[in-house]
Amino acid sequence: MSYTLEELQSLRSFYRNQLLENTVPFWFPRSFDREHGGFLLMRDADGSLIDDDKAVWIQGRATWLLATLYNTVEPRPEWLEGARLGYDFLNTHCFDSDGRMFFHVARDGRPIRKRRYFFSETFYVIAAAAYAKALAQAGDPASEAVAASARSAFGNCIRFASTPGLLPAKFTDTRPAIGIGTPMIMINTAQQLRDTIGDPRCDDWISTWIEQIQEKFVKDDIRCVMEQVAPDGSIIDHIDGRTLNPGHAIEGAWFILHEAMHRKDDQLKDLGCRMLDYMWERGWDQQHGGILYFRDVFGKPVQEYWQDMKFWWPHNETIIATLLAFLLTGDEKYARWHRMVHQYAYDHFLDQAHGEWFGYLHRDGRVAQTAKGNLFKGPFHLPRQEWYCLQLLDNYLKTHSVL
Amino acid sequence: MSYTLEELQSLRSFYRNQLLENTVPFWFPRSFDREHGGFLLMRDADGSLIDDDKAVWIQGRATWLLATLYNTVEPRPEWLEGARLGYDFLNTHCFDSDGRMFFHVARDGRPIRKRRYFFSETFYVIAAAAYAKALAQAGDPASEAVAASARSAFGNCIRFASTPGLLPAKFTDTRPAIGIGTPMIMINTAQQLRDTIGDPRCDDWISTWIEQIQEKFVKDDIRCVMEQVAPDGSIIDHIDGRTLNPGHAIEGAWFILHEAMHRKDDQLKDLGCRMLDYMWERGWDQQHGGILYFRDVFGKPVQEYWQDMKFWWPHNETIIATLLAFLLTGDEKYARWHRMVHQYAYDHFLDQAHGEWFGYLHRDGRVAQTAKGNLFKGPFHLPRQEWYCLQLLDNYLKTHSVL
């Protein structure tokens, strides 16, 4: 069953309403930390603070969100003020003396933990790029310097992503592996940079990283997207190497579908749809609905304890991917999948009492724990989904002369 | 309801039978790796191998188990052969050039991962100590050298445990914390060393580590044993600092009860019972039975995803602790608790089809995944529980002139 234009209009209103009347107001402005800068985001279901620490990933993501809402939805001064709080906190407190960023800091910015990954840095890039655009839009001359900082951080990320051994290793080199996370995050970072302040490096790098995903991680013969492989793309037949993360691969699928839309490239569209197809088949829970967290490529037991739980973010990514695939292809299968995952997610994750989504459900859909924010969850995947789907439907409906 | 001597005799037979007819035969001899040494322990429910990698903790623990069975149950040549396979593999492959040990190695011993903790080293100590005793019992002159190696490794562990900053840190020094894991593992390591080959350092160090637990981690005012605290013993009111691990604290309780029994020390008995009482109250699931994995000291949401699952090992530790507390105090409360946890555990974890226990249940008792062995589970907590309870009941029943 396909989607009619009327249904798409109603979906657009739904996402806009959820975003602006439910999700964003759960977080802001109460999370603005006007004393120390940044945001206080570790909150229980009712919004009460459970910890005043700050996760650097999420400080960057929240900054990106507020600046993006300002740039694309409407120029609310409150959103610009929030983006400034976040950007200034990141710059003042979240960089170590070696130029790399911390992972976890105290409320006042004192560092708690640094990790051996550069995700904090990629979220800094998209935060700074979106904030630079917002400043430009507001006529603030500081925009140039912020944009330069985004570009410089992007350069560092390219270096980290393309120089094996540059960051300290968690594993020895006995059994080298590459993860899909690096090309994925870099595609999205470059796309955000391009869509906000532009950068001549983006297109070529996006092509390179998509090629890497296609050549190394997408296995058409077994209809699978691997989470990690050996450097030559072969499957590492050990517990970790066999572990699939369907929601993550589906996020990668929509980054590629977004590129297909941007470039009007049918081969990329086909690649993104294949990735979505494979990981929907492997990740969708036929028994209870929803996207399972981990699967083993050969059906063996998965070691990570939460393997059959339902987390919020794979559902956000799958809602985007299925809607995008439907709008790009018109294939009613994707409309059907979008209905299924949208229905499951808003039925099970949305907190009817206090707004926003719970993060962690048991396989059967019961809420496992009530936090809305912690070191790993904050205002990102859900508002990004609602915002992205809103933008997508806006553009689609405008093109189809309905809006 | 207390336990009669007859019931204790029947429990003794049960544990002996499970140990020797069910648990140990699941693992051995099929897991002996006669080609590369060590053990192949990562197995699915039916015993089929899911990964031929080797977890160093578990190689050490399995070596300890086999040597201990040889020393205390009966001198089966197969068990001595297994202990030799394990000990030789540990020595040949599991030490890095700096004297510290790896965490995860390939089947042929090539290192995969080293961690910033010294648990591999503590399990080496108990493995070498038990194997040295077995060799002595077998009249093998190599015993002396193996004993010397155990003592030398114990010296390193004391150094790691008592020298802050000696091992690389995971966190900055912004918010210093100490964990109960270090004094706990050191108490048990010293007890095992003392019970096998003896060492003059053990008693004093055990007293020191018990004092540390009592002074820093046991909070009588709120009836709680903390998993981590600030160096002065104060509670760190952040997500990690508030997270309790009831099964782990109960394991610590029985290490202290074991010491109370060894020393005939009523104050230690009281300390161990208080720890057990507090964490039974916080960890026992009133709704479904079993021991919950994590709790928040103030009842806030726990961040670790598997917080309300039931893992096998907290049940092994609680079976030991409740039985030991009952035999030491005669308090029927502990007999009641022992019945409850024993019943829950053998009803839910024991695999009726293939033997041994599943490791991971959902809160409601359903099996979450079927592996019997992986990087974190192997032949240790379950056979140690069955073996320890067998020894305990043997001694008790002999003293009470029933056997």
Image (tube, coloured by chain):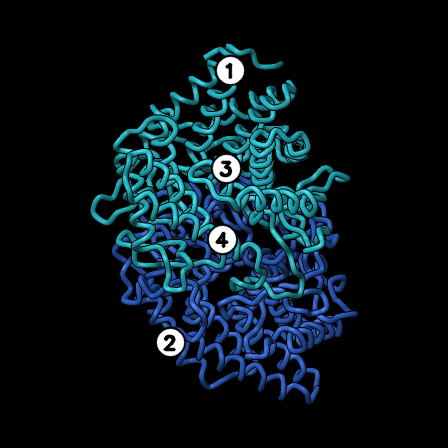
Chain colours: A blue, B cyan
Lateral position of residue B255 relative to residue A106, left or right: left
C-alpha span from label 2 to label 1: 70 Å
Residue B72 coordinates in the image, percent (x, y) = 39, 29
Nearest to the eye among marks 3 and 1: give it.
1
Q: Residues within 10 Å of mark 2 (few under 14, many from 20)?
A: some
Quarter of the image for residue A166 reads bottom left
Which of disc 4 and disc 1 is earlier in sequence?
1
Amino acid type assigned to the residue bearing label 4 in the image? Cys
Amino acid type assigned to the residue bearing label 3 in the image? Phe
State the SS at label 4. helix
Q: Nearer the viewer, residue B153 or B51?
A: B153
State the SS at label 2. helix
**4 and 2 marks in contact (CB < 8 Å):** no
State the SS at label 1. helix
Name the residue that disc number 1 marks: B8
**Mark 3, chain letter?**
B
Q: Which mark is residue B157?
A: 4
How many circles with numbers are drawn on the protein? Answer: 4
Work out whether disc 2 and disc 1 sit on a shared chain: no
Which of disc 1 and disc 3 is earlier in sequence?
1
C-alpha span from label 1 to label 4: 37 Å
